[in-house]
Amino acid sequence: MLSFPILFPGRRKRGRRRVVVVPPPAALSVLSAAVVEFDADILRVNVVFDTTADEPLAGVGGAAPIKWRARYQGLAFEGIAVTLENFDALQITLSLTEPPPLPGPDELSYANAPSDIADTLGRQLGAFQAMPLA
């Protein structure tokens, strides 16, 4: 009877798996904010973002306009509508609020908790205050 030694293939050490950590995308930025209409009770502002036609702003159907506030000509305004105007622009419609006049420069603010404005890359708009209105 012939016997053959049993050969075990050598064990290979497996290298550690590399865990690739992908940093979150940079925040979406506002480039400018300009008043396009002012009618005593209503203020419309076009807000332009750092997006491109290839990676545009995402839909704003679920956006909460109440997160937008403005001070214009010493009056306080609160958001009532957010409309997608272009791949890089939103139009924010704001309504006059009841508090007494607010001294200070014309400005726009956004409170994100959580943000509901993003682009197709997943970048979200961070909260900001005192963006000058042109």
Image: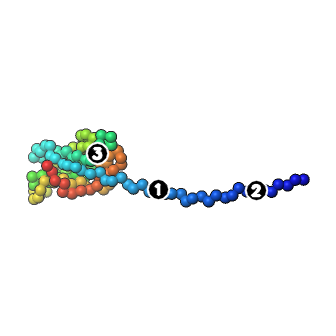
Q: At label 3, which amino acid type do we have?
A: Thr
Give the number of the disc on residue 51: 3
- Whether the residues at callouts 1 and 2 have beta carbons within 8 Å, the answer is no
Which residue was labeled with disc 1?
A: 20
Say which residue label 2 marks. 7
Q: Residues within 10 Å of mark 1 (few under 14, many from 20)?
A: few
For the residues labelled 3 and 1, say whether their Cβ atoms are less than 8 Å apart: no
**Side of 81 relative to 12 (left or right):** left
The residue located at (44%, 57%) in the rendering is: 21
- The amino acid marked with disc number 2 is Leu
Residue 117, percent from left and from top: 30, 48
Horizontally, residue 5 falls left or right of residue 35, namely right
Q: How many marks?
A: 3
Q: Secondary structure at mark 2?
A: loop
Q: Amino acid at mark 1?
A: Val
Of label 3 and label 1, which has the lower sequence position? 1
- Give the distance between the C-alpha atoms of the residues marked 1 and 2, in whole angstroms: 38 Å
Question: Which percent across, then down, holds residue 88?
Answer: 26, 43
* Residue 80 shows in this picture: no
